[in-house]
Amino acid sequence: TMSGLKLSDAEDLDIVEDGVQEGEEKAQRTTVLFHLLFKGLGIFFYVFASLIFGTENVIAFVVIVLLHAFDFWTVKNVTGRLLVGLRWWNEVNEDGSNNWIFESRPEGRQVNANESRIFWTALILTPLIWITFALTSLTNFNFLWFILCCVAITLSGTNLWGYYKCRYTSGTARRALANYAVGFMSSV
């Protein structure tokens, strides 16, 4: 089952409303840095693996998978909450069924538009880049790197799916989408 919740005001989200408070600007820049750091390092090491690791493909594979694991955890547990006020997770019930939980910021709370743009751009582009790498490695019959790309696509794609569900399962998003659809249909 899936549920959409609102984050309570009691949970400190550090979401920017009307500008950045003293000291928060540096913290937010650090959050943006870590949102991009592990993604960028994973791509960098993939592209330059032969130069950095030589023929040690196993070491390169492990390093890149670890970078993706760090990225997955950082985006899921830190940067999504701080940069866009969204959070998701999966709970396994006693009967073995999954319960996906999606939370969004309270209505009226705003996020910094630039940070949101960076968050979503990186979140969307990362799986696309890895899909391109996967197709390239598949056409070159490099199956080890294809498996690595599949791991990267799975981890980055899961975060994309989770945050997409957070953003578009809230009541505000549904109302905005409905208003857009009604406005579009009335103009036709």
Image (cartoon, grey):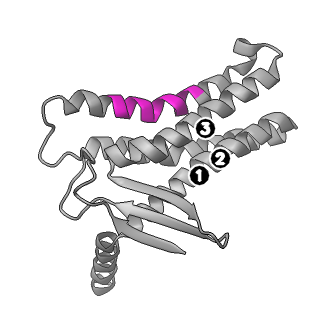
Q: Is residue 70 left or right of residue 188?
A: right
How far apart are the alpha carbons under marks 1 and 2? 5 Å
Which is more toward the observer, 18 or 103?
Answer: 103
Q: Which x, y percent locates residue 177?
A: 34, 74
Depth check, mark 3 against mark 1: the one in front is 3
| Above or below, comparing residue 179 to residue 89 in the picture | below
- Identify the residue under disc 3: 69
Viewport quadrant of the C terminus: bottom left
**What residue is drawn where x is 88% and y is 38%?**
141
How far apart are the alpha carbons under marks 2 and 3? 12 Å
| Above or below, comparing residue 141 to residue 180 in the picture | above
**What residue is drawn where x is 51% and y is 72%?**
2
Q: Are marks 3 and 1 in contact (CB under 8 Å)?
A: no
Magenta part mainly helix, strand or loop?
A: helix
**Residue 64 counted in the magenta span:** no
How dense is the environment of label 1, judged by Cα within 10 Å: few (below 14), some, or many (20 and up)?
many
Give, as a single range, the part of the protein colored magenta: 30-41
- Identify the residue under disc 1: 157
How far apart are the alpha carbons under marks 3 and 1? 13 Å
- Identify the residue under disc 2: 153
Q: Which x, y percent locates residue 114?
A: 28, 41
Q: Earlier in the sequence, mark 3 or mark 1?
A: 3
**What residue is drawn where x is 29% and y is 77%?**
175
Q: Are marks 1 and 2 in contact (CB under 8 Å)?
A: yes
Q: Which x, y percent locates residue 124?
A: 50, 49
Residue type beneath disc 1: Gly
